[in-house]
Amino acid sequence: MNRIELFNDHFQNFKVYQIPKAQLIIADPPYNLGVNAYASNPAWYKDGDNKNGESELAGKEFFDTDKNFKPAEFMHFCSQMLVKEPRESGKAPCMIIFCAFEQLHYYIELGDRYGFKHYIPLVFRKKFSAQVLKANMKIVGNCEYGLLLYREKLPKFNNDGQMIFNCFDWPIDNSTPKVHPTQKPVPLLERLVGIFTDNNDVVIDPCAGSGSTLLAAANLHRRAYGFEIKKDFYKAAKERVLRFIQPQLFQ
């Protein structure tokens, strides 16, 4: 039976839970947007129209914990909790980080400091833009970015004989409820988990948020562990995951 666990705790406290090391770590760490979290998103304005004036979300942040997030501690956790590279090829672990374009170089340097000597940049192409209110003023972005980081050997790679590009389509996910402002689509995470892990491999998400990584891993018969420090998000994520997997799988 595949084990799925979500802890309402900071990933720094991982030793308390004695979880196994991972073949894959997937994380969407805080972007530290501060009070500009909603930026040019329509939610900044009443009814999504800037003619109506600012909404209650204007000048607000997504998470009050962002300012306390320490990327170096996060990277140290990842370096500790990935399995060691095996001697044989095609079995090495890796980690995937979602991040802002401006953060790519920083995480590349930070990863190198913690033993992740190699990287592949990732692009996630959406069919929409959160900058819609500025669409008549400038070119707006429709992509999210990320990094695949690994130590020395190329990671496990299940491509089924197909060429896989570093630009992925961002699918619309209407199959599960939205419970988090930066929620990732389960089908996208299933794609990533499927490429870099096998059945019963361990997946860890240190910033679990909506629980999408855990749900994707459970759907693919992987073992998964997540940490979510915010109590409200933890509760919503747990309820969301429980709705779509057998209750006995969730510890």
Image: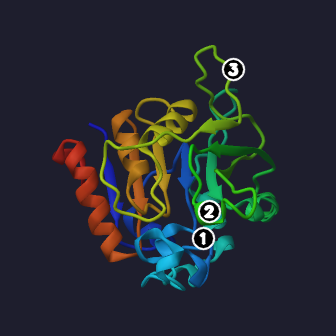
Residue 130 locus on image (x, y percent)? 57, 60
Q: Is residue 188 above or below residue 134?
A: above
Tell me the residue at 44%/38% (across/down).
187
Front position among marks 3 and 2? 2
Mark 3 / mark 2, whichever is N-terminal: 2
State how far apart marks 3 and 1 are (Cα). 36 Å
**Residue 131, label in figure:** 2
Mark 3 / mark 1, whichever is N-terminal: 1
Asked where in the image residue 84 lies, by quadrant, the reply is: top right
Mark 1 / mark 2, whichever is N-terminal: 1
Residue 152 locus on image (x, y percent)? 78, 41
State the residue position of label 1.
40
Mark 1 in CB contact with mark 2 (< 8 angstroms): yes
**Residue at the extreme front of the image, as rendered:** 51
State how far apart marks 1 and 2 are (Cα). 5 Å
Tell me the residue at 24%/44% (across/down).
244
Kind of residue sitting beneath label 2: Gln
Asked where in the image residue 69 lies, by quadrant, the reply is: bottom right
Kind of residue sitting beneath label 3: Met
**Residue at the extreme left of the image, as rendered:** 247
Q: Secondary structure at mark 2?
A: loop
Asked where in the image residue 80 lies, by quadrant, the reply is: bottom right
Residue 75 can be seen in this image: yes
State the residue position of label 3.
163
